[in-house]
């Protein structure tokens, strides 16, 4: 039981390049989330998917797109990377978006945009 | 004002010390509360939920004060391995469900 997995672990991009961050969970959770974490700031929600087939914007969606490929997988795409997108990206999953239960996080992707 | 605020620290304490962290939240629609632990360059992991009656898990005690809108975490008999950042997390239901993470409090436990 791997929990939440993310690929890649590290990535360096040049300004304007594109890339997709992959996330998968094997806990049969309905809801999945993408966050970014910057020094001195809490985790900020980029996009989330309350259930398979739905996606919604979070607090900081500009410059990103997402795809909920199936119940297990939720990807995050940067179409044209900018230095302001240098951050650590965490994927998380949860049984349901409306319950008081907790989120489980993947190990993160450290992205640097030059 | 941030929705969830924590003292960023760092807190530097010797092994064996007792240390307490506080967290305040601004939205009275907050429904459920958690403490997460995040080690350096790792993902956040659930430490414990916080219940209205207070709850304990070994050396860790969590308290919730809904009237004053704050949550606390007490660590007794600190160990070197407790060194980490502790995140306060609040679930809100304001027509839509939302999870808010505090920026975290750093703890260093020294020998």
Image: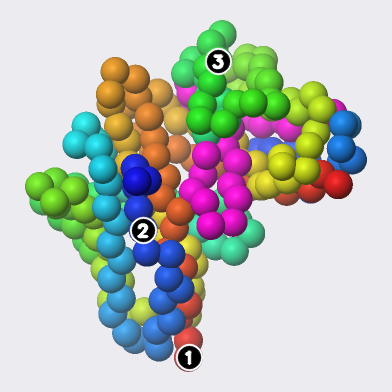
Frontmost of labels 1 and 2 is 2
- Residue B6: mark: 2
Find the magenta span and give its range. A18-44
Q: Position of residue B85 (x, y in %)?
A: 47, 63
Frontmost of labels 2 and 3 is 2
Q: Nearer the viewer, residue A70 or A20?
A: A20
Disc 2 with disc 3 on a shared chain: no
Q: Rounded to the nearest whole Å, what is the CA distance between mark 2 and mark 3?
A: 30 Å
Q: For mark 3, name the chain.
A: A
Frontmost of labels 3 and 1 is 3
Q: Name the residue under label 1.
A: B111
**Image position of A65 with respect to B44: above or below:** above
Queried whether the magenta region covers residue B89, the answer comes back as no
Q: What residue do we see at 66% from left, 20% from top?
A: A66
Q: Rounded to the nearest whole Å, what is the CA distance between mark 3 and mark 1?
A: 48 Å
Q: Where is residue A60 in the image (x, y as percent from the top left)?
A: 57, 31
- Residue A74: mark: none
Disc 3 with disc 1 on a shared chain: no
> SS for tag 1?
loop
């Amino acid at each position: 039981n791997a929990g939440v997995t993310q690929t890649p672990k590290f990535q360096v991009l040049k300004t304007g390049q594109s890339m997709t961050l992959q996330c998968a969970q094997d806990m049969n959770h309905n809801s999945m989330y993408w966050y970014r974490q910057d020094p001195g700031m809490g985790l900020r929600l980029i996009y989330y998917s309350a259930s398979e087939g739905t996606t919604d914007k979070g607090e900081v969606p500009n410059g990103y797109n997402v795809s909920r490929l199936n119940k297990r997988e939720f990807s995050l795409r940067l179409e044209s990377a900018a230095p302001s997108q240098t951050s650590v990206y965490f994927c998380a999953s949860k049984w349901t978006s409306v319950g008081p239960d907790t989120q489980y996080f993947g190990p993160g992707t450290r992205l640097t945009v030059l | 004002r941030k929705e969830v605020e924590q003292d960023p620290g760092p807190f530097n304490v010797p092994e064996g010390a007792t240390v307490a962290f506080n967290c305040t939240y601004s939205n009275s629609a907050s429904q459920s509360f958690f403490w997460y632990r995040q080690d350096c360059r790792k993902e956040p992991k659930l430490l414990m939920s916080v219940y209205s009656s207070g709850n304990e898990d070994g050396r860790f005690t969590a308290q919730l004060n809904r009237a004053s809108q704050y949550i606390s975490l007490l660590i007794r008999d600190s160990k070197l391995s407790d060194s980490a950042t502790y995140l306060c997390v609040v679930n809100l239901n304001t027509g839509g469900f939302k999870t808010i993470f505090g920026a975290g409090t750093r703890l260093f436990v020294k020998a």
